[in-house]
């Protein structure tokens, strides 16, 4: 999804020059939009939301966007499938809210979302 967003942005940045076929640019945008929306399942949207540089993009006023309540619902579905306890589920919801607001420890972010999330993990001390 992120790659499709970037591709759409780049297509929009290409200047229209005399002799260019405006129908081609419109077609390219239409295809990128269609593929994005085809991929925009709950789990893909949640992954986009969890990218530290996309949390505000995922929850926006654009068409087919979702809300923070969607993030809670999706997360609870995952938590339930993984068999987490009620306390773990409640903590997950609190963390999602703190993440959405950019509160500690979810301040800032990196382009490499996996690296950023891994940096938040506190190592468990060896006995």
Image (tube, rainbow, N blue to C red):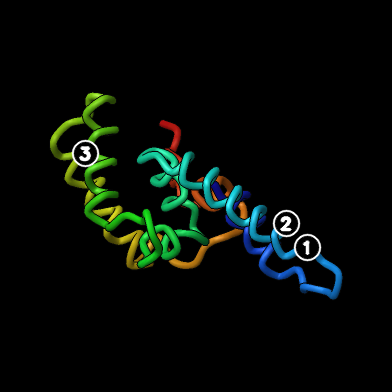
**Direction right: furthest residue:** 19
The residue under label 3 is: 88
- The residue beneath circle 2 is 24
Quadrant in the picture for residue 21: bottom right
Residue drawn at x 72%, y 65% is 22
Check residue 21 in the rendering and tell me which mark sits there, or answer none. Answer: 1
Residue 59 lies in quadrant: bottom left
Q: Residue at x 36, y 67 (%)?
A: 61
Observer-nearest of 97 and 87: 97
Tag 2 or tag 3, which sits nearer the N-term? Answer: 2
Quarter the C terminus occupies:
top left
> Nearer the viewer's eye, disc 3 or disc 2?
2
Reply above or below: 70 against 106. above
User: Which of pointers 3 and 1 indicates the residue nearer the eye?
Assistant: 1
Residue 109, position as x, y percentages in the image: 52, 62
**Label 2 to label 1: alpha-carbon separation:** 6 Å
Q: Identify the mark at residue 13; answer none if there is no mark.
A: none
Give x and y (percent) for residue 54: 48, 59
**Circle 2: element type:** helix
Residue drawn 44% across the image and 66% down it: 107
Q: Position of residue 60 (x, y in %)?
A: 37, 65
Q: Are marks 2 and 1 in contact (CB under 8 Å)?
A: yes
Question: Which element type, helix, strand or loop, lies under badge 3?
Answer: helix
Q: Residues within 10 Å of mark 2 (few under 14, many from 20)?
A: few
Count the labels in the image.
Answer: 3
**Distance from the alpha carbon under mark 3 to that under mark 1:** 55 Å
Separation of marks 3 and 2 at Cα, in angstroms: 50 Å
In the shown orientation, is residue 28 left or right of residue 36? right
């Amino acid at each position: 999804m992120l790659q499709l967003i970037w591709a759409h942005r780049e297509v929009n940045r290409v200047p229209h020059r005399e002799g260019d076929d405006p129908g081609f640019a419109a077609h390219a945008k239409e295809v990128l939009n269609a593929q994005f929306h085809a991929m925009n399942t709950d789990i893909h949207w949640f992954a986009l939301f969890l990218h530290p540089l996309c949390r505000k993009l995922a929850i926006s006023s654009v068409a087919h966007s979702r809300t923070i309540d969607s993030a809670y619902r999706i997360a609870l579905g995952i938590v339930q499938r993984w068999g987490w306890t009620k306390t773990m589920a409640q903590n997950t919801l609190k963390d999602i809210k703190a993440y959405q607001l950019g509160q500690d420890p979810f301040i800032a972010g990196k382009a490499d979302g996996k690296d950023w999330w891994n940096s938040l993990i506190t190592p468990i001390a060896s006995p």
